[in-house]
Amino acid sequence: MEDYIEDLASVLAYGALGIVLLVAGFFVIDALTPGRLGQELVERRSANAAIVVAAGLLAVGAVITSSIAASLEDSLAEGLGSAAGYGVAGIVLQGVAFKAMDVITPGRLGDVIYDRQVAPIAVVHAAFSLAVGAMLAASIA
């Protein structure tokens, strides 16, 4: 029973950390785009915003998943610290990738999010974000 309680505490702690990091990832994307991203998603139902945000969250989720898997052999405190560090690094690098895509493409990517028609660059940005997340996840494993 003692192992079960420790395992349950571990699941809750890593789960809480993962949720906090995902929320932080959303706020980074929101900070890198003009306006309020939540309003664009809920009130204006922007497909471009949904594509970019969903890919960004999946990418951050992949990094968090790899960081948790890589840290399970450590003590809970060490593992949480390691997972948090990798997660924050992943979020920062996703932000850098967002800005890099913004620089190498014409126009401003943040503005494309608010277009009413699905923009091809939103799909390309999503693929770029997922690729960055996969590479970061692999580097942690």
Image (cartoon, rainbow, N blue to C red):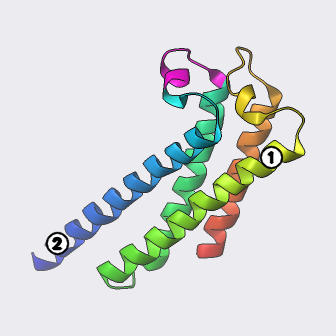
Question: Outermost residue toward the left?
Answer: 1
Which quarter of the figure has residue 10?
bottom left
Choose between 5 and 109: the one closer to the eye. Answer: 109
**Could you say where residue 28 lies in the image, as x and y percent from the top left?**
56, 47
Residue drawn at point x = 56 percent, y = 17 percent? 45
Mark 2 crowdedness (10 Å alpha carbons): few <14, some 14-19, many ≥20? few
**Could you say where residue 85 lies in the image, as x and y percent from the top left?**
49, 72
**Could you say where residue 17 lies in the image, as x and y percent from the top left?**
36, 61
Quarter occupied by the N terminus: bottom left
* 68 versus 96 height, above or below: below
* Amino acid at pointer 1: Met
**Could you say where residue 87 lies in the image, as x and y percent from the top left?**
51, 64
Q: Is residue 66 visible?
A: no
Which quarter of the figure has residue 60?
bottom right
Choose between 25 and 2: the one closer to the eye. Answer: 25
Question: Considering the numbered disc 1 on the image, is that residue within a helix, a strand or a loop?
Answer: helix
Residue drawn at point x = 50 percent, y = 70 percent? 67
Q: CA distance from mark 2 to mark 1?
A: 45 Å
Q: Do labels 2 and 1 touch, CB within 8 Å?
A: no
- Of labels 2 and 1, earlier in sequence is 2
Kindly identify which residue carries mark 2: 4
Residue drawn at point x = 85 percent, y = 32 percent? 107
* Amino acid at pointer 2: Tyr
Q: Which mark is residue 59?
A: none
Kindly identify which residue carries mark 1: 101
